[in-house]
Amino acid sequence: MKKIIMSVLAIGLLTITACNHTQKAVPHTVASGYFVKNTYQDGQLKNPKITTRETFEAYFGMAATMDGNGMPTPIDFDAQYVIAVIGPESDRIPELEVVSLTQESDSITLEYRLNEKQEPASFTSKPVLLLVVDKTHEGEVMIEQVE
């Protein structure tokens, strides 16, 4: 009987401990004014966490925009890193949207959604989602596409 009670207590303690993980939202900025270079091959970006300007510039170029001051979002790689998602090329005008960016222990999870227009366009494009994150939020980055 004593073993059964101890087992039940141990299971209860494990359950409470397992449920005690806390996820917290990670502040970020969605970067604009960048495009995926034509030299990029699908699957080439192995790690979505980019920590140096050299690596970033290997995949992305700058493009002036019509909004704000027309300049791309500034990125300070000494204090920030980028989480990058590059979607498949499509003629349906694809857009990538942040659902959530959370941190639990030493793991950061980005959940995103791919939205595409119903009617095809006369051109193709490769969607990109770039999140600028402060380096105080460190951890392995995992990417999950949600519906």
Image (cartoon, rainbow, N blue to C red):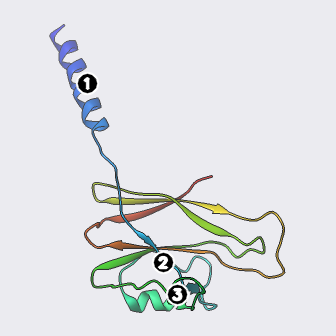
* Residue under the image location 58 percent in, 85 percent down: 35
- Between the residue at mark 3 and the residue at mark 2, the CA separation in whole angstroms equals 14 Å
In the rendered image, the vertical position of residue 7 relative to residue 140, given as above or below: above
Provide the secondary structure element on which disc 3 rests: helix
Provide the secondary structure element on which disc 1 rests: helix
Q: Quadrant of residue 129?
A: bottom right
Left or right placement of residue 33 versus residue 76 in this view: right
* Residue under the image location 34 percent in, 59 percent down: 107
The image position of residue 27, as x and y in percent, is: 36, 64
The image position of residue 84, as x and y in percent, is: 49, 74
**Nearer the observer, 10 or 33:** 33
In the rendered image, the vertical position of residue 119 relative to residue 63, given as above or below: above
Left or right placement of residue 2 versus residue 89 in this view: left
In the rendered image, the vertical position of residue 144 relative to residue 75, given as above or below: above
- Between the residue at mark 1 and the residue at mark 3, the CA separation in whole angstroms equals 49 Å
Q: Residue tagged by mark 3?
A: 59
**Nearer the observer, 65 or 123:** 65
**Amino acid at dot 2:** Ala
Which comes sooner in the sequence, label 3 or label 2? 2
Q: Please name which of the two marks, 2 or 1, marks the residue nearer to the observer.
A: 2
Q: Residue tagged by mark 2?
A: 31
**Amino acid at dot 1:** Gly
* Furthest residue in direction top, as rendered: 1
Tag 3 near tag 2, CB within 8 Å: no
- Between the residue at mark 2 and the residue at mark 1, the CA separation in whole angstroms equals 45 Å
Which comes sooner in the sequence, label 2 or label 1? 1
Q: Residue tagged by mark 1?
A: 12
Which comes sooner in the sequence, label 1 or label 3? 1
Provide the secondary structure element on which disc 2 rests: loop
The image position of residue 48, as x and y in percent, is: 46, 73
- In the picture, the quarter occupied by the N terminus is top left
